[in-house]
């Protein structure tokens, strides 16, 4: 795929996260699109974040041999691009959790949290604000229910902070730091897994 398109990371995301669909069907016996599709999308977007960071390690070699990647496609705008994918990842996880009845909390508050953390790191490290259009608030008739599912959203908030940290502190010119940020995604996955586990207890 790297010889055909600048988006091999997207292809990886679409194939690598297929287990979200197959796993749900294997356990439940059917597909619930309202839950599974946002979960699948979150995985695709997460893959675009971490594998783009990883691809920055190889960008010089890729140029030499004539292959493509999102690292080369995004260039100096990489952090803006993967911030967008990060927002989609967190939003989709929140929506999937909501539809799975892991508490009654709107994804809006966690998107705002991610945007706040993201722009803090961006401002702190680059001394400029990264403008992102905030989504509109949910309707006033929805209320928060801090019931059995609230741990999921607490862990999701922690995961969004971890994702923002790796995006905005990554030194994309350093192979060592790109690898360090790539490996740190084990903690993002562990946090999400813990949120799902404790959110359903």
Image (cartoon, rainbow, N blue to C red):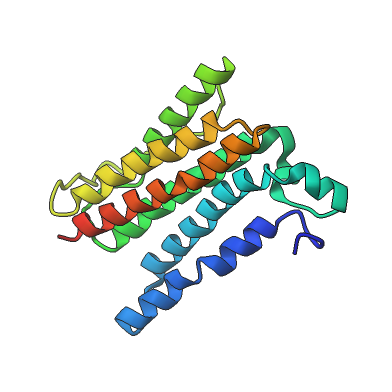
Q: In which quarter of the image is residue 97?
A: bottom left
Regarding residue 18, the answer to whether it shows in the image is yes
Q: Is residue 125 above or below residue 64?
A: above
Q: Quadrant of the N terminus?
A: bottom right
For this orientation, the residue located farthest to the front is 176
For this orientation, the residue located farthest to the top is 127
Q: Is residue 86 above or below residue 9?
A: above
Question: Which residue is at a point 27% across and 41% down the rendered structure image?
Answer: 140
Picture coordinates of residue 7, whole percent (x, y)? 71, 56
Q: Is residue 98 above or below residue 28?
A: above
Indicate left or right for 91 with 74 as reference: left
For this orientation, the residue located farthest to the bottom is 29
Q: In which quarter of the image is residue 82?
A: top right
Picture coordinates of residue 180, whole percent (x, y)? 52, 40
Question: Which residue is at a point 53% across and 45% down the rendered structure image?
Answer: 182
Regarding residue 136, the answer to whether it shows in the image is no
Q: In which quarter of the image is the C terminus?
A: bottom left
Indicate left or right for 135 with 59 as reference: left
Question: Which residue is at a point 44% across and 77% down the rendered structure image?
Answer: 22
Picture coordinates of residue 170, whole percent (x, y)? 56, 33
Indicate left or right for 112 with 72 as reference: left
Indicate left or right for 2 with 103 as reference: right
Looking at the image, how many numbered discs can be counted on the residues?
A: 0
Question: Which residue is at a point 84% across and 46% down the rendered structure image?
Answer: 63
Picture coordinates of residue 87, whole percent (x, y)? 48, 43
């Amino acid at each position: 795929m790297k010889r055909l398109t600048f988006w091999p990371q997207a292809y990886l995301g679409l194939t690598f996260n297929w287990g979200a669909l197959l796993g749900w069907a294997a356990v439940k016996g059917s597909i619930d699109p309202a839950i599974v599709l946002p979960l699948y999308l979150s995985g695709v977007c997460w893959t675009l974040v971490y594998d783009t960071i990883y691809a920055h390690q190889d960008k010089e070699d890729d140029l030499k041999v004539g292959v493509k990647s999102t690292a080369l496609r995004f260039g100096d705008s990489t952090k803006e691009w993967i911030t967008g994918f990060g927002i989609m990842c967190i939003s989709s996880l929140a929506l999937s959790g909501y539809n799975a009845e892991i508490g009654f909390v709107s994804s809006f508050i966690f998107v705002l949290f991610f945007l706040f953390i993201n722009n803090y790191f961006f401002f702190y490290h680059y001394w400029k604000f990264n403008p992102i259009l905030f989504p509109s608030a949910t309707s006033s008739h929805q209320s928060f229910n801090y019931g059995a599912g609230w741990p999921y959203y607490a862990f999701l908030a922690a995961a969004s902070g971890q994702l923002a940290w790796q995006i905005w502190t990554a030194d994309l010119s350093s192979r060592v730091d790109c690898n360090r940020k790539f490996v740190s995604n084990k903690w993002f996955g562990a946090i999400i897994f813990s949120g799902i586990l404790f959110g359903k207890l």
